[in-house]
Image (cartoon, rainbow, N blue to C red):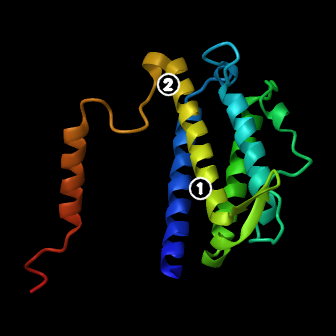
Amino acid sequence: MKAVAELYLSDVRERMAEVRRLGDRALSQLDDAGWHRSLAGGGNSAAVLVQHLSGNMHARWGGLRGGYRPDYEGEPASRDRDSEFEESGLAPAELQARWDDGWAVFLDTLDHLTPEDLTRTLTIRGEPHTVLSAVQRQVAHYSGHVYQLVLIVKTLRGDQWQTLSIPRGQSVAYITQMHAAQAAALPDSDEQR
């Protein structure tokens, strides 16, 4: 079972680093004003989502950066969640710093969790969770908000949007290129004899 837990931790680290890079690439396409635009009245801007993600990452994982601690509460009384959803007017550089710092907290915590930690307990708003379920909860939460960021930025950029995946109409060319790269990486069959 330990091997499965190690595989899970390795995979979740890799997947969440990919989610973060996806957000990085979307946010890099915003101009200064774009950070604070929402798509509809009452909607979240990229700035608000960044503030919320950073606040959540600090609350949930800040006390576990060096490893698991028994009786950890992932929603400290010092957190002001509601303020995370208020437009702060922060400059893009400040928002980028919050984004980077929040992700550093979460990814550093993942780096310090052990397979044995996954079955241990922590609480969030007083509700007990295994570390595994707390991580899974946040994987879904963070991924959802990053995809919201992508939608916001893509909509705001319109024709200037630079795709974050395979461009439309390029799937066959992409797969062909991948297969060619894989074939080139294989050892020559004559050399194996």
User: Relative to 83, does residue 18 appear above or below in the rendering?
Assistant: below
- CA–CA distance in space, label 1 to label 2: 27 Å
Q: Amino acid at mark 2?
A: Lys
Residue 107 in picture, x, y percent from top left: 65, 59
From the viewer's perspective, tell me whether residue 144 is left or right of residue 129.
left
Q: In which quadrant of the rendered view does residue 186 lie?
A: bottom left
Q: Nearer the viewer, mark 1 or mark 2?
A: 1
Label 2 residue SS: helix
Q: Nearer the viewer, residue 11 or 70?
A: 70
Query: In this rendering, does residue 132 appear at all?
Result: yes
Residue lying at 60% horizontally and 17% vertically, measured from the top left? 39
Q: Which residue is mark 1?
A: 136
User: Relative to 191, does residue 122 appear above or below in the rendering?
Assistant: above
Residue 20 in picture, x, y percent from top left: 57, 47
Q: Nearer the viewer, residue 178 or 61?
A: 61
Q: In which quadrant of the rendered view does residue 82 lie?
A: top right
Mark 1 and mark 2 lie on one chain; the one further toward the N terminus is 1
Specify few, some or many for label 1: CA neighbours under 10 Å numbering under 14, 14-19, or 20 or more.
few
Pick out the residue farthest to the right: 78
Residue 154 bears which disc, if any?
2
Residue 65 in picture, x, y percent from top left: 75, 65
From the viewer's perspective, tell me whether residue 187 is left or right of residue 85.
left
Image quadrant where one finds the C terminus:
bottom left
